[in-house]
Amino acid sequence: MKHYYPAIFETAKEGGYTVTIPDIEGCFTEGRTLENAMWMAQDVIGCCLDDLEEKDYPRASGVNDVDTTGYKDFFVTLVEFDKSVYEQHCQALAIAREQMAAMA
């Protein structure tokens, strides 16, 4: 099942973006490019929700309901998260790491 969480993408002083997912406590990340920041946002949502059943996921706010007080040079957009896609990606990474370790 797909979930859509609003995310605040703020331009970082040193370049790239910092990303905050306000509906999930402690959920933030960064990326060097917008594409990388979007991927990292999906990944950090997965990490933060990993121990929860989907029925217990935090309810997503509307994009217009996000408090952006204190942010400068930012935009808010929805980030798609699909637990099954996230789990497949994690499994593929684990297999790749095992294969690399076997080759070493």
Image: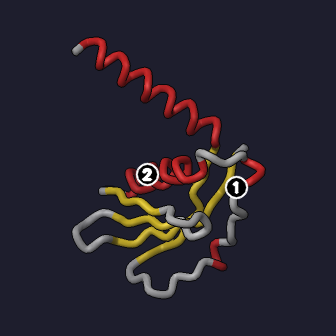
Closest to the observer: 32 or 50? 50
Residue 82, how many percent across, how many down? Answer: 64, 44
Q: CA distance from mark 2 to mark 1?
A: 19 Å
- Left or right of 97 in this view: 44: right
Location of the C terminus (image quadrant) = top left
Q: Secondary structure at mark 1?
A: loop
Which residue carries the number 2 mark? Answer: 40
Residue 99, how many percent across, how many down? Answer: 35, 16
Amino acid type of the residue that numbered disc 1 sits on in the rendered structure? Tyr
- Tag count: 2
Q: Is residue 42 above or below residue 98?
A: below
| Marks 2, 1: nearer the viewer | 1
In the image, what residue occupies the spot 38% across and 66% down? 18
Which dot marks residue 48?
none
Q: Is residue 55 above or below residue 30?
A: above
Location of the N terminus (image quadrant) = top right
Q: Is residue 59 above or below residue 73?
A: above
Amino acid type of the residue that numbered disc 2 sits on in the rendered structure? Met
- Left or right of 15 in this view: 57: right
* Residue 63, picture quadrant: bottom right
In the image, what residue occupies the spot 30% across and 19% down? 100
- Left or right of 34 in this view: 67: right
Which residue carries the number 1 mark? Answer: 57
